[in-house]
Image (cartoon, coloured by chain):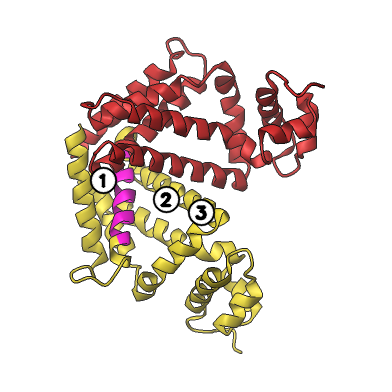
Chain colours: A red, B yellow
Amino acid sequence: MGRWEPGARERLVVAAVDLFNEQGYDATTVAQIAERAGVTKSTFFRHFPDKRELLVAGQETLSRLLTEGIAEAPEDAGPLTAVTAGLLRAAGMMGPVNRRLAPRLRAAVAASTELQERDALKSVSLGAAMTDALIARGVPDPTAAVASELGALAFKRGFARWSEGDQEGKDDLGALILTALDELRAASASLT
Amino acid sequence: MGRWEPGARERLVVAAVDLFNEQGYDATTVAQIAERAGVTKSTFFRHFPDKRELLVAGQETLSRLLTEGIAEAPEDAGPLTAVTAGLLRAAGMMGPVNRRLAPRLRAAVAASTELQERDALKSVSLGAAMTDALIARGVPDPTAAVASELGALAFKRGFARWSEGDQEGKDDLGALILTALDELRAASASLT
């Protein structure tokens, strides 16, 4: 088996999510995941430090794309416009595998407190990273915090709608996230 | 040593936070915490299931007070008024020990990924509980989500200011939380 195996990373994630659903997170070993994916254990460890990181590895990329999108938005863009740029960049990384995998991934996380905790920390870190990226643009602190919370909620809600089914008109993740952001903005305006 | 030991719970929390700071979370055992607090191990286990829960046990009470305050707000109160009622009720549970302990507690959490994850999940659950309490009042979903995010941010920021020092005019946690909520509301209005 060669060192370079195209698709190994993706196959490992799919195999892990399936095994977590079939037999539980705790009972699943790295060896079983590698076997199901048709790769060696050392291939597993070239991609992930352990089975827990496997499920949240995508969030590092997500965080990077969100903050890069915010940082590189036009200089005169307001906070929510910069957040929108980050959200659209992050949406671009999500493909058919992410969409198909999402319901089983949610089920696996819901069944394991350990995974829920890991997931919650990643989600809190993601909000903090967006807030920092806005502050680096000169957005004042409380505004940056609110804008990044609205952005995080919009991504979560748009992604949930996108991955909950193949309904007509729900194929464009970016559009669903922007709709969610508009709803949240209107809700926020009604509050203040 | 009698079964009823006044202050044992509080002494256990103080002892644990001290030990976590002195020697790290991983290296600290339940036996050491009990010894430092001057109680038996079985007293420890009457109060907490394990050393990890000890640090977040207060968040259960916090969540209950927040949601009760929201649920029992006057029927005609708007979403942010109901959230304010919850925040003030929760602020009432915080005493001098919470304030004194907060910086060391933060340091202990910052030094342990396991505690950070536990803390993040509790914080996410707290937001979800507030959102549910608002929805139960008839607040529509996106508005409930935004109002509870603003409330959670206000609590966090008010609590941080309160516990960061004994500055003049920073003794009233409730007032600090309301000031933070006003700032967040203004920031939110500037965005939308």
Q: Residue at x 31, y 63 (%)?
A: B91
Among all residues in the image, which is located at the extreme bottom?
A: B1
Q: Which residues are magenta?
A: B146-160
Q: Point out residue A145 in the picture as x, y percentages from the top left corner.
A: 30, 43
Q: Residue at x 43, y 14 (%)?
A: A172
Disc 3 packing (10 Å; few <14; some 14–19; many ≥20): many
Q: Amino acid at mark 1?
A: Asp
Quadrant of the drawing holding the N terminus of chain B: bottom right
Q: Say which residue label 2 marks.
A: B126
Q: Residue at x 59, y 76 (%)?
A: B33
> Is residue B172 rendered magenta in the image?
no
Q: Amino acid at mark 2?
A: Leu
Q: Residue at x 32, y 35 (%)?
A: A150
* Chain of the residue displaying label 3: B
Looking at the image, residue B14 lies above or below residue B179: below
Q: Point out residue B50 in the picture as x, y percentages from the top left corner.
A: 62, 65
User: Which is more toward the observer, B132 or B190?
Assistant: B190
- Quarter-of-image position of residue A10: top right
Q: Is residue A166 visible?
A: yes
Measured Cα–Cα span from mark 1 to mark 2: 23 Å
Q: Are marks 1 and 2 in contact (CB under 8 Å)?
A: no
The secondary structure type at the circle numbered 3 is: helix
The secondary structure type at the circle numbered 1 is: helix
* Chain of the residue displaying label 2: B
Q: Is residue B56 left or right of residue B188?
A: right
Q: Say which residue label 1 marks.
A: A141
Magenta portion: prevailing SS class? helix
Looking at the image, tell me whether mark 3 or mark 2 is earlier in sequence order.
3
Q: Say which residue label 3 marks.
A: B116
Q: Is residue A78 left or right of residue A24?
A: left
